[in-house]
Image (spheres, grey):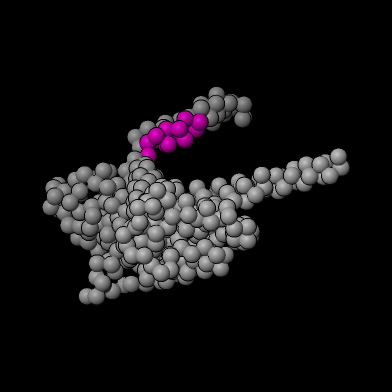
Amino acid sequence: MLQHLDTIIAFAVVMLGVSLLITVLTQMVTSLFGLRGTNLKDGVALLLATVHPEYERHAYDIARRVLEHPMISHSNFKREGSVLKWFRRRWRLASAVRVEELIGALEKLSAGAPAPAAHAAPATLTTEQAMAAIAAAARATAGPEVTALAEQVRALVAGVPTPAGGAAGAAPVTVQLDKIAERIPASAETALRGLKSWFNSAMDRTAQRFTLHARLWTVVLSILFVFVAHFDALRVLKQISSDAELRAKLVGLTDTMTEKADKILAPKDERPAGGAPTAPAPADIDAVKQLKGQADEIKKQLGDAGIQLVPVPYPGLCPALAELPGMLAAAALLSLGAPFWFNVLKNLSNLRPLLATRQEKEQAQKRAT
C-alpha cells in the first residue's frame, strides 16, 4: 500500500514540477505582454466610461496617462524610444492602483488646465478638462440623504434652548440626536457615488479578466509544452512505478517542490483597495530573467532525480501514434494548473506518515503471531 502511495506522490511531484514550469512560462508571457497593466487600463477606462459616459471618448487616454504616471507606475522604462515601442508602452503601465491614487493622479495631470466655458458641452472639453471634472465629481462623495441629515442635525442643535433644569432638560434633544446619528452611517454607505462607489466592483472584474487570460495561456502553453517536449504522462507513471530508486528520489523532492511552489504561486503585485501594497514584481524584462532562473532550477531538480522532460535524441515535432494517449492525458492534467497539483501533493504528503505508521503496526503484529 505504501509503495502505491509513493508512486502517486512521485507522480504528483513530477506533475507539480512541470506545472510550475508552465506557470513560470505563463508569468513570463504576462510580463512580456504587460497583461496586468493592459487589463487594468481597460478596467479603469471602463470605470470612467461607466461613471461619466459624457467623457467616454477620453476614457482610454485618461486611463493610459494615469497608469503611466511616475507616482503610480513602477516600471523602469520612462522613455518610449523606437525599439520595442509596443512592449515598452505596455511595461510602463501600472499593474495596481488605489482609488485615492486614481483621483490624485487625475488632479495632478489636470493641474493648470483652463476652466471650461460656462455651459460648455462635455464633448468640447479637452482631456485635461475632463480629468478635472471627473476628479471634482469624485471628491464630492456626500449624497443628498447625508446632506439632509446633516442639515437636520444643525437645525436641531441651533434650536436647542438653554436648559433651565440643567442637563436633564436636554434629554429629549439628546435622544433625537442619537437616532439621527445612527441613521447617518447607513445613509452615507448607500449615498456614495461616482468613482468611489464603482471602483471596487470595477477592480474585481478586472482581476477576473486577468485571471481568465492567464488561465487561457496556461492551457495553451500546457498543450504546446506536451507536444513539443513529447511529455507522456503514462510513460512517466510507468517509469516511476517500475523504478524504486527513482520513486524514492522523487518522494524526497516533496518538500523542496512545495517550497518552490510557495514562492512561485505566492500573490504578486496585488494591492487591495485602501491597503498597503505587497512587494511588487518588476514589470519589465528583469521579471522575465528572474522567472527563467526559476524554470532552470526546477528543470535541474527533476533532471537530477532522473526525470528527462525532453527525450534524447529528440524525435522531432511529429509525435508517434503510441505516444498520443499519454500526451493527451498529460495536456489535460497540466491544464489543471500548479495550484491543483500543489494541494494534491500536500494532502498526499500529510497522508504518508499515517499510512507508514499503520503499515509498521500491521507488520509488527504479523511478526508477533
Residue 202 in view in this figure: yes
Instruction: Report whether 352 appears left or right of 17.
Output: right
Q: Nearer the viewer, residue 258 or 12?
A: 12
Q: Residue furthest right?
A: 368
Choose top left, top right, bottom left or bottom right for residue 152: top left
- Image mark count: 0
Quarter occupied by the C terminus? top right
Q: Residue furthest top?
A: 172
Q: Is residue 79 above or below residue 181?
A: below
Residue 127 position within the rendered picture, expressed as x and y whole percent measured from the top left: 20, 57
Residue 332 position within the rendered picture, expressed as x and y whole percent measured from the top left: 41, 47
Quarter occupied by the N terminus? top right
Instruction: Report whether 354 appears left or right of 171.
Output: right
Choose top left, top right, bottom left or bottom right for residue 77: bottom left
Q: Is residue 216 above or below residue 110?
A: above
Q: Nearer the viewer, residue 275 or 257?
A: 257
Taken as a whole, is the magenta stretch helix, strand or loop? helix
Residue 57 position within the rendered picture, expressed as x and y whole percent measured from the top left: 17, 51
Q: Residue at x 24, y 46 (%)?
A: 49
Q: Residue at x 62, y 29 (%)?
A: 166
Residue 224 in view in this figure: no
Q: Is residue 191 magenta?
A: yes
Q: Nearer the viewer, residue 364 or 61?
A: 364
Residue 330 position within the rendered picture, expressed as x and y whole percent measured from the top left: 43, 51
Q: Residue at x 34, y 40 (%)?
A: 193
Q: Residue at x 61, y 30 (%)?
A: 167
Extent of the magenta region: 181-192
Q: Nearer the viewer, residue 44 or 215?
A: 215
Q: Is residue 189 magenta?
A: yes
